[in-house]
Image (cartoon, rainbow, N blue to C red):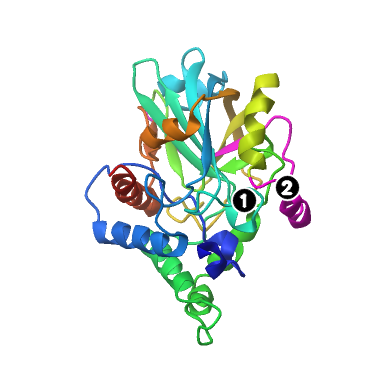
Amino acid sequence: MVVSRYGRALAAGVALALLGGLPARAQDSSTAEQTIDVMNTLFGKHPGKRANHAKGVVAEGSFTPSADAAKISKASLFAGPAVPVTIRFSDATGVPTIADGAANANPHGMSLKFKLGDGSDMDVVLNSLAYFPVATGEEFRDLLKAVSESGPDAKKPTALERFVATHPAAATAGSTAKTPSSFARQTYNGVNAFVFVDKDGKRQPFRFRVVPVQGEEILSAEEAAKREPNYLVDEIGPRVAKEPAKFRVLAQLAEAGDPTNDATKPWPESRKTLDLGTLTVTKVVPDSAEAEKALLFMPNALTDGIDVSDDPLIDARVQAYAVSFGRRAQ
């Protein structure tokens, strides 16, 4: 099976939520093509499915902004009443039949599409990693390539071992993502930096964080292995039908000197977090498999009052997803 080719050390750090959306500007498309090519090598080709985070479930809900959010950003998302939100929860890898409790299904993902009052959308793409294993799209491609060349019979030191020796975050990022008891009981992080802009033009870099109101509930590897293969996907619908799942949408605010262009470097936990509002998940859509085919979650699909930062991974995600969407739409 494809996954077994890299189900050793660092495997959880490889199946990552790099992919995001459509291109905002021209970039080296060959890097994106090569990234998706190596994902297809690692995970196999599955027509109509995403190259990464292929297995998922689509839900609906709403976002209610806090009073404080409008003070830091002029975004319409924070200025008015609650807005509808489409949510996609997902497992990592491009294998649509991966077991939800498998180590390689980490990091689990959450993608949000806010339906704004003017008819436009705003997207946020998150996963359960605390930080990313590499800083650029080229490095991510090279990491995947190193994994693909480091099978059990590979000569030592393997390509992956050589890569990790010069990219220390690649050795540790994967261990920050753990298997939850429910998609509703996991914390999801925005590893990329964005920038709030208020009504006076003041700019504040930040990273998104979405935290379950009920608290995070993580399973041990042994507990996760005992769960049914689809336990996360199957559990979320009945859960929210009985009682909506709520999350606090937070912004971790950067201080002077905090890097905004390197997703491998988390900011200190001592940094202030601002409560932006409440995400409420109320139902799973009737035909999730069909609904997700048309869904595009674009990390650069923002709104006035929220800008991209100088993080190069934002554009890298945009370009890679353009390639992935083009292939699955054929």
Query: Are there few (<14), some (14-19), or many (20+) residues within 10 Å of tag 1?
Result: many
Q: Image quadrant for the C terminus?
A: top left
Residue 145: percent from the left, percent from the top? 41, 70
Q: Which residue is mark 2?
A: 227
Q: Earlier in the sequence, mark 1 or mark 2?
A: 1
- Examine the image and state in which quarter residue 213 appears: top right
Which type of secondary structure does the marked residue at label 1 adopt? loop
Which type of secondary structure does the marked residue at label 2 adopt? loop
Residue 15: percent from the left, percent from the top? 52, 57
**Contact, CB < 8 Å: mark 1 with mark 2?**
yes
- Vertical comparison of 206 with 74: above or below: below
Residue 214: percent from the left, percent from the top? 73, 31
Residue 258: percent from the left, percent from the top? 51, 51
| 207 magenta-colored | yes
| 249 magenta-colored | no
- Residue type highlighted by circle 2: Arg
Circle number at residue 99: 1
The residue positioned 40% from the left and 37% from the top of the image is 297
Circle number at residue 134: none
Q: Nearer the viewer, residue 204 or 41?
A: 41
Tell me the magenta residue range: 201-229
